[in-house]
Image (cartoon, grey):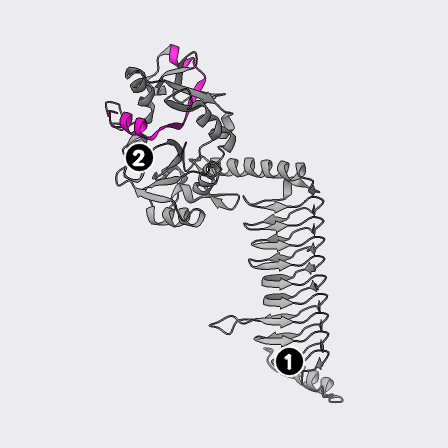
Amino acid sequence: MPTALVILAAGQGTRMQSERPKVLHQIGGAPLIAHAILSGATLAPDRIVVVTGHGAAEVEAAVTTFDPDAICIRQAEQLGTGHAVLQAAPALEGFEGDVIVLYGDTPFIRPETLHAMLEARKTHDIVFLGFEAADPGRYGRMRMQGDRLLRIVEAADATEEDLAISFCNSGLLAGDAATLMGLLARVKTDNEAGEYYLTDLPALATAEGLSATAIACPEAETLGINTRAELAGAEALFQAGKRAEMLDAGVTLIAPETVHFAYDTHIGRDALVEPHVVFGPGVTVETGAHIRAFSHLEGAHLGADTVVGPYARLRPGTELGNGARIGNFVEVKAARIGEGAKVNHLSYIGDAELGADANIGAGTITCNYDGVMKHRTTIGAGAFIGSNTLLVAPVTVGAEAFTATGSVITEDVPDQAMALARARQVNKPGLAAKLMARLKAIKAGKKEP
């Protein structure tokens, strides 16, 4: 059966104390709304509808980044969760299938849970997601009779009997699109907040002879983010999960608690990651690679058996061929480093291409920016770039060519040629002693009596 997602992302999130919409705060290098999209995407939905409100333009831009086909609908007034889902009705017109309602600030819902909700839909008209709460507190209680969900009671309206229930509402639900919209059209605002609540649906469904149920998932999976402290706690949970995932996949982490991953980090088996390495989004590491301490990687692909760091920075567009070496205090950006090539010390390689087995000396800089545009540097296979060379792009150094230490290379260097581009050294006998004496005299003359 076709499936659609409706993701609620209109709230302001005042407790975050932020000008930024709550769903744009990040976990693992991706905004909260992206985690909801990526989780739901495992169902291969036919439609994704995101309901936006506060900071709508910013939220919609983030949504488009992760799913260009998602439909964004704006909720001008925030009148409750039921009202928010109703805003999706025009985007679901003519849709015949199941709708799953997700929340943009609930990042840990597993694909397995969503599949379980759809499985329960085979025997029930409406399916809610619940959890056994360690501290039910403010959560809505789910009153069950066997496998039937009779009603959801908000904590503020609960009786003593209701408050004794520990099975609580996560807010997520699934139902046939037509049935769901039909029930929502009958939700009233006769509550303390004067809002349209999704929690009214089980009672409405029962009254109409429909079947509602609730399935359970772990409480941690339903964690919603409302404060900075909760965001920090969620980040810690995310990182713990990714570290465990890496270890299970055959990656060696010398000090796992010090390594930070992004939502999409992929590392092959038998790779070794030393302490205090940070992975930004878009990093793929092949088998056998060695990433040394205090390195920062983002938007980079590392081939098999590469070595990076310590204290290296790989920026977006970096591609390391198998066996390449990037050493300490080296920065690489938008560059292809060929197989076996080495950039071992204190260098910047940007907008460049290095051939196989090229060797870049310490202090080398590709001067890629003229103040307006970026230009590329090409270094051939087996070339040797002397220490403290400046390569003023656009420029090409041919295969097996050399540049002398301290050169400023502004013209192409042919294959197997050696380029020297520096001023001739001139020694002035005795001038250093004379200059020092003069400077000391000037300094003494400036002292106050």
Q: Is residue 351 visible?
A: yes
- Residue 180 found in image quarter: top left
Residue at figure coordinates x 46%, y 25% from the top left: 119
Of callouts 1 and 2, which one flags the residue occurring earlier in the amino acid sequence?
2
Q: Amino acid at mark 1?
A: Ala
Region of the chain picked out in magenta, as a range: 161-188
Tell me if residue 386 can be seen.
no
| Picture coordinates of residue 244, whole percent (x, y) | 63, 36
Instruction: From the image, tell me which residue sits under label 1.
Output: 444
The structure residue drawn at horizontal position 50% and vertical position 24%, both measured from the top left corner, is: 217
| Neighbour tally class for label 2: few under 14, some 14-19, many 20 plus, Cα within 10 Å | many
Left or right placement of residue 157 versus residue 172 in this view: left
- Is label 1 in a helix, a strand or a loop? helix
Quadrant of image for the C terminus: bottom right
Q: Position of residue 297 (x, y in %)?
A: 60, 53
Side (left or right) of 155 relative to 216: left
Q: Is residue 83 left or right of residue 112?
A: left
Q: Position of residue 386 (x, y in %)?
A: 71, 73
The three-letter amino acid code for the residue at tag 2 is Ala
Q: Which mark is residue 84?
A: 2
Nearer mark to the viewer, of 1 and 2: 2
Foreground: 12 or 280? 280
Disc 1 crowd, CA 10 A, few/some/many (<14, 14-19, 20+): few
Image point 73% across, 70% down: which residue?
382
- Residue 202's place in the image compared with 59, above or below, is above
Give residue 146's position: percent from left, percent from top: 43, 11
Residue 78, magenta (yes or no): no
Q: CA distance from mark 1 to mark 2?
A: 79 Å
Q: Secondary structure at mark 2?
A: helix
